[in-house]
Structure formats: structure tokens, C-alpha cells
Image: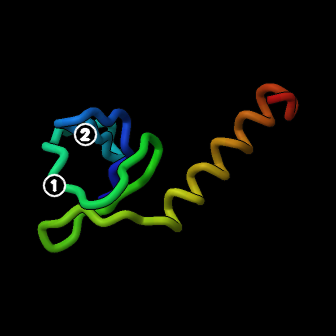
């Protein structure tokens, strides 16, 4: 299951899974510099950053924006 980062603050990270369910976790559960829009997968009890999935989704969002707005963004 993939989780995208919706919001980050000092204590909590708000994650949204592929089904649209939202999960709020304590900041210390994910190591490193967590940013909105990053994608993580949950494996063996840990949230792991997935650079390939993050890149794939950002590319798809850009394609959709270009379709909607004619590439003017």
C-alpha cells in the first residue's frame, strides 16, 4: 500500500492511502526530511520513502495539469 504525504507539522504527518483513507502518525515514525507530496510504502512495520513512485505520480500530475491548462502552468 502506498501513502502520499498530505501535510507535515512539527509533531504529526498526515498520510492519504490509495483508497483515500487518511492516517495521522507521529513525526518520529518516519525518518528523514518528509515533504508534502512524497510517497511512502509500508513494509515490515516501517514507512519507507519510494522515490520512483513519487516521481511517477508527480509526472502524472504534471501531464494532467498540462491537459487541463494547456501547459501554461
- Depth order, front residue of 32/45: 32
Quadrant of the image containing the C terminus: top right
Counting labels gives 2
- Depth order, front residue of 26/67: 26
On screen, residue 64 versus residue 66, left or right, reads: left
On screen, residue 1 versus residue 66, left or right, reads: left
- Depth order, front residue of 10/4: 10
Q: Provide the residue designation for mark 2.
A: 13
On screen, residue 26 versus residue 10, left or right, reads: left
- What scheme was used to colour the molecule? rainbow
Asked whether the beta carbons under mark 2 and mark 1 sit within 8 Å of each other, the answer is yes
Q: With respect to residue 65, does 35 lie above or below?
A: below
Name the residue rendered at 80%, 36% in the picture. 66
Q: With respect to residue 25, does 47 lie above or below?
A: below
Residue extending furthest bottom? 44
Locate residue 35, reporting x and y percent: 42, 45
- Sequence-wise, the earlier of marks 2 and 1 is 2
Name the residue rendered at 59%, 59% in the picture. 56
Locate residue 42, reporting x and y percent: 24, 63
The quadrant in which residue 67 appears is top right
Query: Neighbour class for label 1 at 10 Å: few (<14), some, many (≥20)?
Result: few
Locate residue 58, reporting x and y percent: 60, 49
Locate residue 22, reporting x and y percent: 24, 35
Q: Provide the residue designation for mark 1.
A: 29
Name the residue rendered at 15%, 43% in the picture. 25
Amino acid at each position: 500500500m502506498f501513502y502520499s504525504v498530505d501535510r507535515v507539522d512539527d509533531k504529526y504527518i498526515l498520510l492519504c492511502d490509495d483508497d483515500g483513507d487518511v492516517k495521522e502518525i507521529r513525526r518520529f515514525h518516519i525518518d528523514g526530511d518528509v515533504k508534502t507530496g512524497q510517497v511512502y510504502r509500508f513494509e515490515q512495520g516501517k514507512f519507507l520513502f519510494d522515490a520512483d513512485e513519487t516521481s511517477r505520480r508527480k509526472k502524472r500530475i504534471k501531464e494532467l495539469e498540462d491537459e487541463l491548462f494547456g501547459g501554461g502552468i
